[in-house]
Image: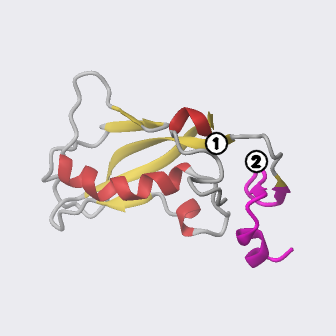
Amino acid sequence: MDAQQHRSDPKMSLSRDGQRPQAAPENDDTFELYDLRVDVVADGSGRPMVCDHPVGSYFELRGENLILPPGQTFPIYPLAAILPLLPAKQRVTDRNDWMTTDTDIACPDPHCGGLFRIRRIGKRTFHHGDVTVVPLGGPEGNP
């Protein structure tokens, strides 16, 4: 089965290593997501950290929940730049995909020397019915 056929076959899923396709059992409603940690690091340019995210600060994403350490804040503008990438980083990706290899995201302020390093720190299993009321197969029975 080639890659195009694999993408179009709803009964196929990636193996745990993200490499080989395998058939998903018909009654299995589970899926896995990575837990993520986003650390603030300096970009090495010598530019100052002009936004309110000091080196060493971080947050974690566990499932759909954003976790900040007690007493720590995180500015909304860099968070808004990072958020669209996180759901893709939570999913199994091909080893050749840039989502797998690229971990550092620049602060959206062009004068800031901050980077946000996204790391996968664990994996959780979820059940479809625990995260949505839409039945498997969609509202019209489509996969």
Examine the rendered structure and indicate whether residue 6 appears above or below residue 143. below
Q: Which of the 4 quarters of the picture holds residue 22?
A: bottom right
In which quadrant will I find the N terminus? bottom right
Between 97 and 136, which is closer to the camera in this rendering? Answer: 136
- Does the magenta segment cover residue 118? no
Q: Is residue 140 above or below residue 69?
A: below
Label 2: element kind: loop
Q: Is 14 in the magenta? A: yes
Please tell me which residue is depicted at 67% across the width and 64% down the height of the picture: 94
Q: 91 and 38: which one is in front? A: 91
* Residue 102, horizontal then vertical, whole percent: 50, 63
Residue 135 location, quadrant: top right
Question: Which residue is label 2 attached to?
Answer: 16
Separation of residues labelled 1 and 2 (CA atoms): 9 Å
Answer whether residue 79 is visible to the viewer in this image: yes
Q: Is residue 92 left or right of residue 79?
A: right
Q: Residue at x 47, y 52 (%)?
A: 87
Give the residues drawn in magenta, as a range: 1-22
Contact, CB < 8 Å: mark 1 with mark 2? yes
Q: Give the camera-side residue of 41 and 32.
A: 32
Image location of residue 3, percent across then percent down: 76, 75
Q: Position of residue 85 (x, y in %)?
A: 42, 58
Q: Nearer the viewer, mark 1 or mark 2?
A: 1
Residue drawn 79% across the image and 40% down it: 27
Q: Position of residue 79 (x, y in %)?
A: 27, 50
Q: Quadrant of the C terminus?
A: bottom right
Q: Amino acid at mark 2?
A: Arg
The earlier-in-sequence mark between 1 and 2 is: 2
Point 53% across, 49% down: residue: 90
Check residue 32 in the rendering and tell me which mark sits there, or answer none.
1
Can you name the residue that lies furthest to the front here?
Answer: 140
Query: Can residue 123 be seen at all in this image of the molecule?
Result: no
